Image: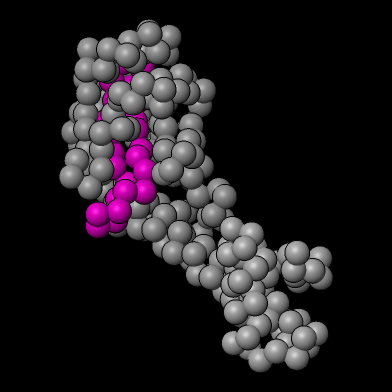
Amino acid sequence: MEFSVDAARWHSWASRLVEAPTARMPLELLALACELVPGGSVSLRLDPDEIHLSDPRPGLLEEEQTSTGAGPATMVGPTALALPAADVAATWPPLAAAVDGTGLRSCLALALVVGEQRLGSLTLWAPGPEALEEPLPRVAGALAALASVVLALRRREQQLEEAIASRDVLGQAKGILMERLGLDPDQAFELLTAVSQRRNSKVRAIAEQLTTAGELE
């Protein structure tokens, strides 16, 4: 199969991934990958334990990989960006029954990585190896690289949002203690820390309890 790799196509793909809401981004990636394997299927793993499927067929294959630890998705990463398998059952015998049940006998697994950080894997499944011949691996690899960057940026945005939210709730909790007990900011934080240690909870959890329930304990 011939694939167009012109700039307009990549711009369209990048726009779809970047503009998709966070919850829908995995579905957009599955849809784009499915364009590369007509008649095949795609599965997406996002570490640590999130799995998305283009259709039900690869579901059993992913379940077996999770339960046995064998399979292409478990082997790709920063040092192995792509792993093709013409005969999945022969390469990973624990997956043989799942292969027979789905008819997806060949695959191309691609790592989703940024630097040394593994974000997950993207696996293209097909009835036979001819559907996964060049230039598909090259194009699919570029798509995986693009998706990796978008995923990494989304995760960083989420971390920043959580950090800001944590700082806000902590500031509110300190303000409550300062007003109620006449403490200064450092003393209010020390009190929150002491309660968190005594209860073996995070300071943020203690602060959230204070701001929502009005009580430290």
Asked whether residue 31 is drawn in magenta, I would say no
Compared across the picture, whether 1 is left or right of 194 comes to left
Q: In which quarter of the image is residue 43?
A: top left
Q: How is the image coloured?
A: one colour
**Could you tell me which quadrant the C terminus lies in?**
bottom right
The residue stretch that appears in magenta: 103-126
Q: Nearer the viewer, residue 36 or 143?
A: 143
Q: In which quarter of the image is residue 22?
A: bottom right
Q: Which residue lies furthest to the front in this view?
A: 198
**Could you tell me which quadrant the N terminus lies in?**
top left
User: Please, is residue 196 above or below residue 167 in the view?
Assistant: above
In percent of the image, x 24 and y 54: which residue is there? 116
In percent of the image, x 51 and y 42: which residue is there? 27
Asked whether residue 104 is drawn in magenta, I would say yes
Compared across the picture, whether 168 is left or right of 103 comes to right
In percent of the image, x 40 and y 13: which residue is there? 98
Q: Nearer the viewer, residue 135 or 187?
A: 187
**Residue 136, x across and y down, in percent:** 24, 35
**Residue 97, x across and y down, in percent:** 38, 8
**Residue 19, x across and y down, in percent:** 51, 59
Number of numbered tags placed on the structure image: 0
